[in-house]
Image (spheres, rainbow, N blue to C red):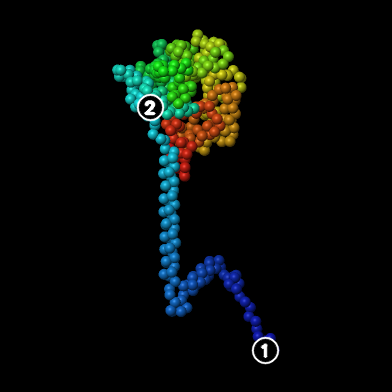
Amino acid sequence: MENTVSEKKIEPQVTVVDIEEGVPRSQKCKTRVSRFGSVLRKSFQRSDKSEASPWPKLVRRTLYLLTVTLCLAVIGYVIYHALLLALVRRISPPAPPTNGLTEIVTSWVEPGTVTPAPPSWLPQFSRDVQPKAIHSHNDYWRRVPLFDALALGITGVEADCHLINGELYVGHRVVDLRNSRTFRSLYLDPLTSILTNQNAANGVAPDSTINGVWDVNNTQGIVLMTDLKTEGFATLAAVQKQLEPLRQKGWLTYWNGTAIVPGPITHVGTGNTPFAAVLNSSYGNSSYRSVFFDAPLDNLSSNLYNTSNSYYSSVSINKVFSGKRKIARGGLSKTQVATVKSQIEKASSLGLVSRYWDLPAWPVEKRMTVWEQLESLGVGMLNVDAIEEATRWNWKWCHVLGLTLC
């Protein structure tokens, strides 16, 4: 019996791998595919004819899966857009306050085109308007110069001045100048009317304080910046001469030889304004000065500029970051932020108000990113062209869920 068992031959175990060792690659692939197909067929093959077919169950499960996926997609879609609408409502600007300024903006016409001229002041002039540290760049381009900015709470306006035949015209280029658009008609006459009415005695309790434009903060002044486009000395002298009535009323901020005496209007000269004429002219000297220089923000190391002669300290941001250092779409880089921070801190240490002009205008998200970065770095005045976006929209929330909402 034992001999019979020993005489049995043990057949070697042969695996699929051993079989395929000598088979070409293409045949190996066919073998694997056919084996997979065989397994798949067996999985659906009924060993007993009484067994139910697995196909209905598979179809039902597939339909269930598709239904659940579709429901989740719809729920996600609804939540996404509900959140989006809630954010839009949150950042959308409220209705502008009803006051004298909004009425003036609505009824404003070009100076000299109608008689009598529309008023420059109405009761409750700037009620509910909060002043903001924003500069209206090239303000004369607005539909309503000066008043559009004031209605939004902007505390800095800019007028480009051209001295031609003894008159100061306001416009960006010579071809833009018109007889009706003068420094006096667009800015000085309206400001005179505003401050005269804001300081009118109420007949009950006389107040020696000089009131400014803002009802909510009567001590908050505005900056009137003149960007001189023609020869500096003569143009500045003409500006100073036209400001004389405001100066006599005590409405201009001035240096008294030892300190700054604030007024409702701070006059800042830029463009072709000569620094020498700011320091000494027929309207000012070392003991009195009512015009202040726009000092170069990127060149304050000489210590020539301080609160006795300067107010703004400005520079084109494209001058600071040009060529390979140009601002990227995502805003200021870490190196650029460090540069801006050092310049702002230097200006602040001298008592000057830092301002960057020529900021990115497009794309919108780049502009708003730079705005936010400058504010977070403590810039003294945010220079803007899009005054509506900068003042009424909550632009720090304008880019949400991959969409631009402002």
Secondary structure of residue under mark 2: loop
Measure the alpha-carbon separation of dots 2 and 1.
Answer: 118 Å
Residue 239 % position (x, y): 45, 14
Classify 10 Å Cα crowding around label 2: few (below 14), some (14-19), many (20 and above).
Answer: some
Residue at 37% of width from left, 21% of height from top? 121
Residue at 44% of width from left, 68% of height from top? 58
Image quarter of the C terminus: top left
Q: Check disc 1 and give the amino acid type.
A: Thr
Report the side of 60 relative to 21 (left or right): left
Residue at 43% of width from left, 63% of height from top? 64
Front label number (2 vs 1):
2
Q: Check disc 2 and give the amino acid type.
A: Asn
Residue 120 position by quadrant = top left
Query: In this view of the protein, can residue 17 be seen by the observer?
Result: yes
| Residue receiving disc 1 | 4
> 22 or 110: nearer the eye?
110
Residue 207 % position (x, y): 46, 17
> 316 or 263: nearer the eye?
263
Marking on residue 99: 2
Residue 326 vertical placement versus 37 (above, below): above
Image quarter of the N terminus: bottom right
